Each structure stands twice: as structure tokens, then as C-alpha cells.
């Protein structure tokens, strides 16, 4: 879906920091650590405030080494390895994200199921890409700010992965923004890319966030705040897609 949804137009920004959002935030934290949810688990909330759950399958695409696995770890509040290992086969991770809709004030618990696959496996086994894309609602195309070739490869990567006729949300994420002093991609190039392709572009760090007082455990809340803009953005574009599918808003033009 080639459409740009204005940030904050559908999902309330900084809501988890508000009084209303605290109880929902607590449902995905345990002693300020991120909760890890199994396949059949979900956040527990009192019945009177339990939100509807909106589930989405999201596939991450990008060259080897751009930080797909690290991005998912960041979204889930998990430790990011300092050593790069090529992902073997397909790996999935479920992340719950509570958000408040701007127009109705309704709270939705977004359930993102992230699918990650190593580039070598994609090239070796033809069926893996089909499995990752099967019933996928969105694809996150990743490039690294420290790898110029990964940015240059985005157009051909998108044409290889997604057919023009497929109505699927496409989002671009630039990783390793913590190394921006060594970037190979300029802000102007990002703006030009966004204007040409009409796709949302987000920036994220690829390092572990702050830790708790023990010096070992990741600070769950601080880690959430580092990726809040991305998870809210993903939620907004997926929710907009659902509104289009339901005929509640006009359909955009597809590339």
C-alpha cells in the first residue's frame, strides 16, 4: 500500500506515558522488564478495560547484516547480540502494543507477529519467501545507515518481494541510526526517496537501551519509548489499511 499516514493522525502519540495509558503499559511489563509472550499468551487486563486485539503478520526484508533480527529484539525488549549471526530458516516473535485511537478514544491491543528470515535461506529455498509473505499484512524493508548499498538496493528489493498488484503495507526502516556520525545516507536522500516512493521511513538505533539499577537488566519502559514512534507508525498504517478494506475511508492509489 503506497500511502503515507501522518504521524499521530490515527494513534495518540505519547499515550502510554499518560495516566490513562499506565495500566495498559503495565500489562506488557513486569517489574519494569518487558514481558515475553508465548504463542497462546496475551496481556492480562481487568475485564472492564480489556481492549480488542488486532492481529497482524509482518515480514522483515533486507540485506544480510542490516539488523532485521536486532530490530525485532528491539521491538520485543530483548537483548541485542553484539555479534552478527545469519538467521537460519524462519524465526517469529510476537509483540503486543497497546494504542489509543485519536478519533474514537478506543484502545486497541495490537498484536504484531514479526517474521524474520536470513538472506541465505531465502536464496537457497524457494518456498521460504512464499511462507513469509503468506497472509502478511505488512512488509518492513530495512536498510542500514552504515551500508550505502543496502539503501541503494531498496527499489529492486521492493520490486522482487512485492508485486504491484498486492495490497500490502510497505514501510521502510533505517537501522543503526546510533552510528549516524558514520552514515552513508543523507537526510536529503531520505526525503527524496520518500517523495518518490510515497512510503513512510523510520529511523531506529540498533543497540541495547538503558538498563535498570542492577546494570544487567534492560529497562523495559525506556526501551519501549525508543521504539514507540515506529510501533505507533506501523499500527497507524495497518489500521488505515483495515479502514480502507472495510470501505470506511477512500482507497489510495497503489504503486
Image (cartoon, rainbow, N blue to C red):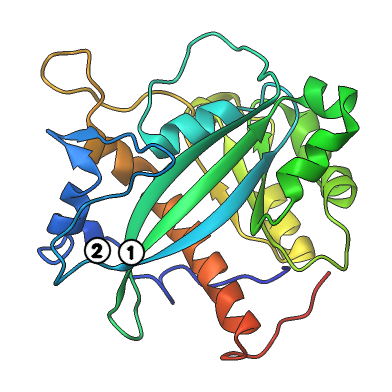
Please state the horizontal and vertical placement of residue 141, each as a whole percent of the image.
69, 45
Image spot of residue 182 (x, y percent)? 59, 24
Q: Position of residue 111 (x, y in %)?
A: 44, 54
Q: Is residue 240 above or below residue 88?
A: below
Q: Which residue is mark 2?
A: 15
- Separation of marks 2 and 1 at Cα, in angstroms: 7 Å
Q: Is residue 32 above or below residue 46?
A: above
Q: Is residue 17 visible?
A: no
Depth check, front residue: 198 or 103: 103
Relative to 198, is 32 on the left or the right? Answer: left
In the rendered structure, find residue 99 and report the number of the disc placed on it: 1
Decide which of 202, 48 is in the foreground and name it: 48
Tell me the quarter of the picture where residue 166 sits: bottom right
Describe residue 179's horizontal placement relative to residue 78 as left or right.
right
Q: Disc 2, disc 1: CB below 8 Å? A: yes
Relative to 52, is 115 above or below?
above
Q: From the top left corner, tell me how far across and down residue 123 is, in percent.
A: 88, 26
Amino acid at each position: 500500500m503506497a500511502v503515507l499516514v501522518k504521524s499521530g493522525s490515527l494513534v495518540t502519540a505519547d499515550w502510554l506515558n499518560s495516566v490513562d495509558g499506565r495500566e495498559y503499559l503495565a500489562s506488557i511489563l513486569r517489574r519494569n522488564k518487558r514481558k515475553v509472550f508465548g504463542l497462546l499468551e496475551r496481556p492480562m487486563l481487568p475485564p472492564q478495560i480489556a481492549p480488542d486485539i488486532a492481529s497482524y503478520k509482518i515480514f522483515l526484508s533486507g540485506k544480510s547484516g542490516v539488523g532485521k533480527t536486532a530490530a525485532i529484539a528491539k521491538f520485543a525488549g530483548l537483548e541485542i547480540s553484539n555479534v552478527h549471526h545469519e538467521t537460519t530458516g524462519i524465526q517469529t516473535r510476537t509483540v503486543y502494543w497497546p494504542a489509543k485511537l485519536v478519533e474514537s478514544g478506543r484502545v486497541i491491543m495490537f498484536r504484531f507477529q514479526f517474521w524474520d528470515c536470513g538472506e541465505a535461506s531465502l536464496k537457497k529455498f524457494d518456498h521460504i519467501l512464499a511462507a513469509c509473505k503468506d497472509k502478511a499484512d505488512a512488509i518492513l524493508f530495512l536498510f542500514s545507515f552504515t551500508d550505502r548499498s543496502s539503501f541503494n538496493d531498496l527499489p529492486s528489493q521492493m520490486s522482487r518481494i512485492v508485486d504491484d498488484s498486492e495490497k500490502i503495507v510497505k514501510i521502510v526502516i533505517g537501522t543503526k541510526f546510533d552510528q549516524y556520525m558514520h552514515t552513508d545516507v543523507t537526510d536529503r536522500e531520505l526525503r527524496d526517496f520518500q517523495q518518490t516512493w510515497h512510503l513512510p521511513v523510520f529511523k531506529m538505533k540498533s543497540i541495547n537501551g538503558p538498563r535498570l539499577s542492577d546494570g544487567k537488566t534492560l529497562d523495559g519502559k525506556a526501551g519501549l519509548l525508543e521504539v514507540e514512534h515506529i510501533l505507533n507508525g506501523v499500527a497507524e498504517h495497518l489500521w488505515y489499511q483495515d479502514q480502507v478494506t472495510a470501505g470506511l475511508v477512500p482507497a489510495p492509489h497503489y504503486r
